Image (spheres, helix red, strand yellow):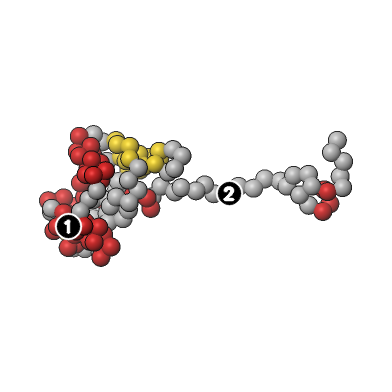
Amino acid sequence: MAKKEFTYRGKNLQELQSLDLKALAAVFPAPSRRKLLRGLSEGEKTLLKNLQQRDRVKTHCRDMLVLPAMIGKTVMLHTGKEFAPLTMTEQMLGHRLGEFALTRKRVQHSAPGIGATRSSASASVR
């Protein structure tokens, strides 16, 4: 069975990559369109320029949109403590980078300590 070709709102990846930002904004949903029409910040412009030169770039721009020019590249996105690697895929188009790098870890509780429960409050420490 053949692999299904990716399309985003009726356009394939090559068509999306050939569009400029204003034409791309017309394809994106309203919040993404608003971000593109207001213009990219200096940090976001620098990120796009660096991605054209290299395949792996570190950034703190969690509110940057995933654009067609970023597909196939790796972005090291800051989570507040470390940089998490993100490989851009077609399904990420139009989303923000911060959606894919979680800032909080899942809580993993172990056994309760001494004094944490009523039965262990009177237990000897030895």
Apparent side of residue 122 relative to residue 103 in the rendered image (left or right)? right
Query: Quick one: SS at disc 2?
Result: loop
* Residue at the spot 17% in from the left edge and 57% down from the top edge: 24
Q: Is residue 107 above or below residue 24?
A: above
Q: Specify whether 98 is left or right of 112.
A: left
Residue 2 in sight:
no
| Numbered circles on residues, count | 2
In the image, 68 versus 13, the foreground residue is: 68
Residue bearing the label numbered 1: 24
> Can I make out residue 98 in this image?
yes
Query: In the rendered view, would you say 82 is above or below 19?
Result: above
Q: Is residue 101 left or right of residue 94?
A: right
| Quarter occupied by the C terminus | top right
Instruction: Report the residue at 17% width, 63% height from top.
Output: 26
Q: Residue furthest bottom?
A: 30
At 64% from the left edge and 48% from the top edge, which residue is drawn? 109
Question: Given the image, on which type of amino acid does mark 1 rest?
Answer: Leu
- Residue 99's disc is none
Check disc 2 and report the residue beneath it: 107
Disc 2 residue type (three-letter)? Val
Helix, strand or loop for disc 1: helix
Quarter of the image holding residue 1? Answer: bottom left
